[in-house]
Amino acid sequence: MGLYSSPELLEWFTYEYLNYSKRKLDMGKSCIRFKKMEDIPYQLIGQLAAKMTPQEWISTYERSVKR
C-alpha cells in the first residue's frame, strides 16, 4: 500500500483522517478497515488516491524489491 512506502503520505493521511472521521483509524499492513459503510470517508480516500500515481507506486515498489 502506498501509505507505508511514503512516510510523508502516511503522516498526512493519519492527520487528515481525524478531520473526516470520529472513529479511530484501523489500518493494517495493506488495508484500511471500516466497520460500517457510512464510516468510509470517500472524499479523503479520493484525495489519497490522487496523491500517488500508479507510476510512482511502481517505481517505489521496484526500488524496494531491488534491495
Image (cartoon, rainbow, N blue to C red):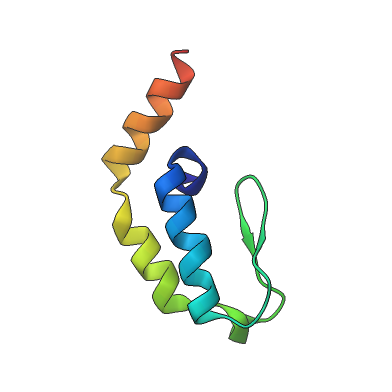
Q: Measuring 40% from the left and 48% from the top, which residue is drawn there?
A: 8
Residue 52 locus on image (x, y percent): 32, 50
> Residue 40 appears in which quarter of the rendering?
bottom right
Q: Measuring 31% from the left and 44% from the top, which residue is drawn there?
A: 54
Q: Nearer the viewer, residue 17 or 50?
A: 17
Looking at the image, residue 49 sits to the left or right of residue 26; the answer is left
Number of numbered discs? 0
Residue 26 locus on image (x, y percent): 68, 63
> Residue 22 appears in which quarter of the rendering?
bottom right
- Above or below — where is 39 with respect to 47? below
Q: Measuring 50% from the left and 80% from the top, which residue is drawn there?
A: 20
Looking at the image, residue 8 sits to the left or right of residue 30; the answer is left
Q: Nearer the viewer, residue 26 or 61?
A: 26
Of all residues shown, which one is farthest toward the bottom?
Answer: 38
- Above or below — where is 50 with respect to 16? above
Looking at the image, residue 41 sits to the left or right of residue 26; the answer is left
Residue 11 locus on image (x, y percent): 48, 54
Of all residues shown, which one is farthest toward the right?
Answer: 35
Q: Measuring 52% from the left and 43% from the top, which residue is drawn there?
A: 4
